[in-house]
Protein backbone atom coordinates (compact mmCIF):
# COMPACT_ATOMS: atom_id res chain seq x y z
CA UNK A 1 0.00 0.00 0.00
CA UNK A 2 1.55 3.31 -1.12
CA UNK A 3 2.17 6.13 1.36
CA UNK A 4 0.79 9.47 0.15
CA UNK A 5 1.07 11.76 3.18
CA UNK A 6 2.89 12.79 6.34
CA UNK A 7 1.22 14.41 9.34
CA UNK A 8 1.36 15.03 13.10
CA UNK A 9 5.10 14.87 13.64
CA UNK A 10 5.91 14.57 17.36
CA UNK A 11 8.95 14.12 19.56
CA UNK A 12 9.72 13.29 23.19
CA UNK A 13 13.05 13.41 25.01
CA UNK A 14 14.35 10.09 26.32
CA UNK A 15 15.10 10.63 30.01
CA UNK A 16 16.26 7.13 31.00
CA UNK A 17 17.25 4.00 29.12
CA UNK A 18 18.89 1.26 31.20
CA UNK A 19 18.41 -2.46 31.70
CA UNK A 20 16.27 -1.66 34.74
CA UNK A 21 14.09 1.23 33.55
CA UNK A 22 13.04 3.36 30.61
CA UNK A 23 11.17 6.67 30.56
CA UNK A 24 10.39 9.61 28.30
CA UNK A 25 9.42 13.21 28.83
CA UNK A 26 6.32 14.94 27.51
CA UNK A 27 5.31 14.24 23.91
CA UNK A 28 5.39 17.52 21.96
CA UNK A 29 4.35 18.45 18.40
CA UNK A 30 6.89 19.27 15.71
CA UNK A 31 4.70 21.16 13.26
CA UNK A 32 5.13 21.64 9.52
CA UNK A 33 6.16 18.12 8.51
CA UNK A 34 7.01 17.80 4.81
CA UNK A 35 8.69 14.42 4.46
CA UNK A 36 10.57 11.80 6.43
CA UNK A 37 13.08 9.21 5.25
CA UNK A 38 14.09 6.16 7.32
CA UNK A 39 17.16 4.27 6.14
CA UNK A 40 18.35 1.36 8.33
CA UNK A 41 21.90 0.15 7.86
CA UNK A 42 22.32 -3.61 7.80
CA UNK A 43 25.76 -5.13 8.36
CA UNK A 44 26.17 -8.51 6.71
CA UNK A 45 28.92 -11.08 7.23
CA UNK A 46 29.11 -13.81 4.61
CA UNK A 47 30.92 -17.13 4.85
CA UNK A 48 31.89 -19.06 1.73
CA UNK A 49 32.79 -22.74 1.67
CA UNK A 50 32.93 -25.42 -1.06
CA UNK A 51 32.92 -22.64 -3.65
CA UNK A 52 29.51 -21.37 -2.57
CA UNK A 53 27.80 -19.12 -0.04
CA UNK A 54 27.70 -21.20 3.12
CA UNK A 55 26.30 -18.78 5.69
CA UNK A 56 25.07 -15.19 5.81
CA UNK A 57 24.51 -13.34 9.09
CA UNK A 58 23.01 -9.86 9.23
CA UNK A 59 22.89 -7.36 12.10
CA UNK A 60 21.11 -4.04 12.33
CA UNK A 61 23.45 -1.06 12.44
CA UNK A 62 22.59 2.61 12.79
CA UNK A 63 19.33 3.97 11.36
CA UNK A 64 19.67 7.21 9.41
CA UNK A 65 16.56 9.40 9.51
CA UNK A 66 15.99 12.70 7.73
CA UNK A 67 12.98 14.90 8.42
CA UNK A 68 12.13 17.99 6.40
CA UNK A 69 9.91 20.60 8.07
CA UNK A 70 8.40 23.88 6.97
CA UNK A 71 9.86 25.66 9.99
CA UNK A 72 12.15 25.06 12.94
CA UNK A 73 11.96 27.80 15.62
CA UNK A 74 15.17 28.53 17.49
CA UNK A 75 13.80 27.34 20.84
CA UNK A 76 12.89 23.98 19.33
CA UNK A 77 16.23 23.74 17.57
CA UNK A 78 18.01 24.39 20.87
CA UNK A 79 16.06 21.60 22.61
CA UNK A 80 16.61 19.04 19.86
CA UNK A 81 20.32 19.77 19.40
CA UNK A 82 21.35 20.62 22.94
CA UNK A 83 22.24 24.22 22.07
CA UNK A 84 21.87 27.28 24.28
CA UNK A 85 19.22 29.89 23.64
CA UNK A 86 20.04 33.12 25.44
CA UNK A 87 18.13 36.39 25.01
CA UNK A 88 16.70 35.14 21.73
CA UNK A 89 20.13 34.16 20.35
CA UNK A 90 20.95 30.53 19.50
CA UNK A 91 24.48 29.74 20.69
CA UNK A 92 26.09 26.62 19.26
CA UNK A 93 29.28 25.23 20.80
CA UNK A 94 31.64 22.43 19.78
CA UNK A 95 30.88 20.47 22.94
CA UNK A 96 27.08 20.67 22.66
CA UNK A 97 25.46 17.30 23.35
CA UNK A 98 22.13 16.56 21.70
CA UNK A 99 19.69 14.59 23.89
CA UNK A 100 18.30 11.22 22.91
CA UNK A 101 14.69 11.37 21.79
CA UNK A 102 11.82 9.53 20.16
CA UNK A 103 10.15 10.65 16.95
CA UNK A 104 6.55 9.82 16.01
CA UNK A 105 4.28 10.61 13.07
CA UNK A 106 1.49 9.22 10.93
CA UNK A 107 1.42 8.72 7.17
CA UNK A 108 -1.68 8.62 4.99
CA UNK A 109 -1.93 5.51 2.82
CA UNK A 110 -3.48 5.37 -0.62
CA UNK A 111 -6.56 3.59 0.78
CA UNK A 112 -7.37 6.58 3.02
CA UNK A 113 -6.22 5.05 6.31
CA UNK A 114 -3.12 5.98 8.30
CA UNK A 115 0.08 4.20 9.21
CA UNK A 116 1.43 5.19 12.65
CA UNK A 117 5.16 5.27 13.42
CA UNK A 118 7.31 5.70 16.54
CA UNK A 119 11.11 5.72 16.24
CA UNK A 120 12.20 5.05 19.78
CA UNK A 121 15.77 6.28 20.36
CA UNK A 122 17.77 8.70 18.27
CA UNK A 123 19.98 11.74 18.41
CA UNK A 124 19.91 14.80 16.15
CA UNK A 125 22.92 15.93 14.15
CA UNK A 126 23.95 19.58 13.60
CA UNK A 127 21.79 21.11 10.88
CA UNK A 128 23.23 21.82 7.45
CA UNK A 129 21.96 25.24 6.36
CA UNK A 130 21.45 26.50 2.83
CA UNK A 131 21.00 30.19 2.05
CA UNK A 132 20.74 31.86 -1.34
CA UNK A 133 19.78 35.23 -2.75
CA UNK A 134 16.21 36.01 -3.71
CA UNK A 135 15.40 35.44 -7.40
CA UNK A 136 12.46 36.07 -9.71
CA UNK A 137 11.05 32.62 -9.04
CA UNK A 138 10.21 31.60 -5.47
CA UNK A 139 12.50 28.94 -4.03
CA UNK A 140 11.72 27.66 -0.53
CA UNK A 141 14.61 26.77 1.75
CA UNK A 142 13.28 24.38 4.36
CA UNK A 143 15.21 22.98 7.34
CA UNK A 144 16.20 19.32 7.26
CA UNK A 145 16.78 17.48 10.51
CA UNK A 146 19.10 14.49 10.37
CA UNK A 147 19.01 11.88 13.12
CA UNK A 148 20.88 8.71 13.95
CA UNK A 149 18.52 6.19 15.53
CA UNK A 150 19.44 3.03 17.37
CA UNK A 151 17.93 0.27 19.50
CA UNK A 152 16.99 0.95 23.11
CA UNK A 153 19.19 -0.57 25.80
CA UNK A 154 16.17 -1.55 27.90
CA UNK A 155 14.50 -3.89 25.44
CA UNK A 156 16.36 -3.74 22.10
CA UNK A 157 13.40 -2.13 20.32
CA UNK A 158 13.95 0.70 17.81
CA UNK A 159 10.64 1.18 15.99
CA UNK A 160 6.89 0.64 16.41
CA UNK A 161 4.57 0.60 13.36
CA UNK A 162 0.79 0.18 13.26
CA UNK A 163 -1.85 0.40 10.53
CA UNK A 164 -5.17 2.06 11.27
CA UNK A 165 -7.01 -0.44 9.06
CA UNK A 166 -5.65 -3.45 10.95
CA UNK A 167 -8.34 -5.35 12.87
CA UNK A 168 -5.96 -5.89 15.80
CA UNK A 169 -4.93 -2.23 16.20
CA UNK A 170 -7.09 0.17 18.22
CA UNK A 171 -4.57 2.66 19.59
CA UNK A 172 -4.79 5.45 17.05
CA UNK A 173 -6.51 7.84 19.47
CA UNK A 174 -3.72 7.53 22.03
CA UNK A 175 -0.74 7.03 19.71
CA UNK A 176 0.78 10.43 20.41
CA UNK A 177 -0.06 10.58 24.12
CA UNK A 178 3.13 8.76 25.10
CA UNK A 179 6.05 6.89 23.57
CA UNK A 180 5.56 3.10 23.66
CA UNK A 181 7.34 1.52 26.63
CA UNK A 182 7.17 -2.08 27.86
CA UNK A 183 4.59 -2.67 30.58
CA UNK A 184 5.85 -4.47 33.69
CA UNK A 185 3.13 -6.85 34.93
CA UNK A 186 5.35 -8.92 37.21
CA UNK A 187 4.03 -7.35 40.45
CA UNK A 188 0.44 -7.86 39.32
CA UNK A 189 0.87 -11.50 38.30
CA UNK A 190 2.71 -12.29 41.57
CA UNK A 191 -0.08 -10.68 43.59
CA UNK A 192 -2.74 -12.57 41.60
CA UNK A 193 -0.96 -15.85 42.42
CA UNK A 194 -0.86 -15.00 46.14
CA UNK A 195 -4.49 -13.90 46.13
CA UNK A 196 -5.65 -17.06 44.36
CA UNK A 197 -3.73 -19.24 46.84
CA UNK A 198 -5.42 -17.40 49.69
CA UNK A 199 -8.85 -17.85 48.10
CA UNK A 200 -8.24 -21.54 47.34
CA UNK A 201 -7.34 -22.17 50.96
CA UNK A 202 -10.29 -20.26 52.39
CA UNK A 203 -13.36 -22.04 53.75
CA UNK A 204 -16.79 -20.45 53.48
CA UNK A 205 -18.81 -20.52 56.66
CA UNK A 206 -19.61 -18.84 59.95
CA UNK A 207 -17.18 -20.73 62.19
CA UNK A 208 -13.92 -19.16 63.46
CA UNK A 209 -11.27 -19.10 60.72
CA UNK A 210 -13.89 -19.22 57.97
CA UNK A 211 -15.11 -16.49 55.63
CA UNK A 212 -18.62 -15.19 54.83
CA UNK A 213 -19.90 -16.12 51.38
CA UNK A 214 -20.34 -12.48 50.34
CA UNK A 215 -16.74 -11.57 51.16
CA UNK A 216 -15.51 -14.71 49.41
CA UNK A 217 -17.42 -13.80 46.24
CA UNK A 218 -16.22 -10.18 46.34
CA UNK A 219 -12.61 -11.26 46.65
CA UNK A 220 -13.02 -13.78 43.85
CA UNK A 221 -14.43 -11.05 41.59
CA UNK A 222 -11.46 -8.80 42.45
CA UNK A 223 -9.03 -11.54 41.40
CA UNK A 224 -10.90 -12.03 38.12
CA UNK A 225 -10.76 -8.29 37.42
CA UNK A 226 -7.01 -8.20 38.10
CA UNK A 227 -6.51 -11.20 35.84
CA UNK A 228 -8.38 -9.37 33.11
CA UNK A 229 -5.89 -6.52 33.31
CA UNK A 230 -2.97 -8.96 33.29
CA UNK A 231 -4.37 -10.62 30.15
CA UNK A 232 -5.02 -7.30 28.38
CA UNK A 233 -2.23 -6.75 25.84
CA UNK A 234 -3.19 -3.07 25.53
CA UNK A 235 -3.10 -2.27 29.26
CA UNK A 236 -0.65 0.53 30.05
CA UNK A 237 1.56 0.78 33.13
CA UNK A 238 -0.84 3.13 34.93
CA UNK A 239 -3.69 0.65 34.54
CA UNK A 240 -1.53 -2.24 35.71
CA UNK A 241 -0.29 -0.32 38.74
CA UNK A 242 -3.86 0.64 39.65
CA UNK A 243 -4.90 -3.02 39.41
CA UNK A 244 -2.14 -3.94 41.88
CA UNK A 245 -3.42 -1.38 44.39
CA UNK A 246 -7.04 -2.49 43.97
CA UNK A 247 -6.26 -6.19 44.39
CA UNK A 248 -4.03 -5.53 47.39
CA UNK A 249 -6.86 -3.61 49.06
CA UNK A 250 -9.30 -6.44 48.24
CA UNK A 251 -6.92 -8.96 49.79
CA UNK A 252 -6.62 -6.89 52.96
CA UNK A 253 -10.41 -6.57 53.20
CA UNK A 254 -10.84 -10.31 52.73
CA UNK A 255 -8.35 -11.14 55.48
CA UNK A 256 -10.17 -8.77 57.83
CA UNK A 257 -13.44 -10.56 57.04
CA UNK A 258 -12.22 -13.81 58.62
CA UNK A 259 -14.65 -14.97 61.30
CA UNK A 260 -13.15 -14.78 64.76
Image (tube, grey):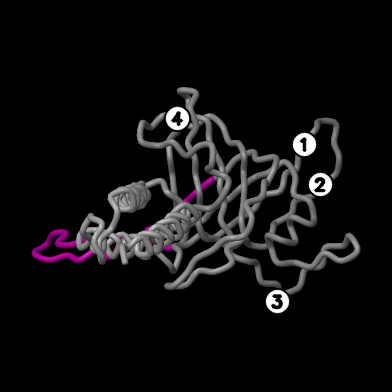
Residue interval drawn in magenta: 37-61
User: Which residue matches tag 4?
Assistant: 2
Q: Badge 3: how crowded within 10 Å, few (<14), some, or many (20+)?
A: few
Q: Which mark is residue 95?
A: 3
Q: For numbered disc 3, what is the local secondary structure?
A: loop
Question: In terms of depth relative to the viewer, which is nearer, 97 or 219?
Answer: 219
Q: Nearer the viewer, mark 4 or mark 1?
A: 4
Q: Is residue 52 magenta?
A: yes
Asked if residue 206 lies left or right of residue 1, the reply is left
Above-or-below relation of 251 to 29:
below
Find numbered disc 1 in the image and state the secondary structure of the residue it sits on: loop
Q: Residues within 10 Å of mark 1 (few under 14, many from 20)?
A: few
Image x and y of residue 201, in percent? 20, 63
Q: Residue 139, labelled with which disc?
A: 1
The residue at which mark 2 appears reads as 132
Q: Secondary structure at mark 4?
A: loop
The overriding secondary structure of the stretch rendered in magenta is strand
Q: Earlier in the sequence, mark 4 or mark 1?
A: 4
Amino acid sequence: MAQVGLNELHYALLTEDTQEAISYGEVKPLSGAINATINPTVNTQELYADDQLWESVSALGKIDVEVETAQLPLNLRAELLGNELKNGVLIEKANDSAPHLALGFKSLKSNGSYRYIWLLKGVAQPIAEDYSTKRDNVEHKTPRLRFTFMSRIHDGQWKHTADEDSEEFSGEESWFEQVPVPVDKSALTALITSAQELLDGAVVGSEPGEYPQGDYDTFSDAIDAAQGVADDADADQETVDAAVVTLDEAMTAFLEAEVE
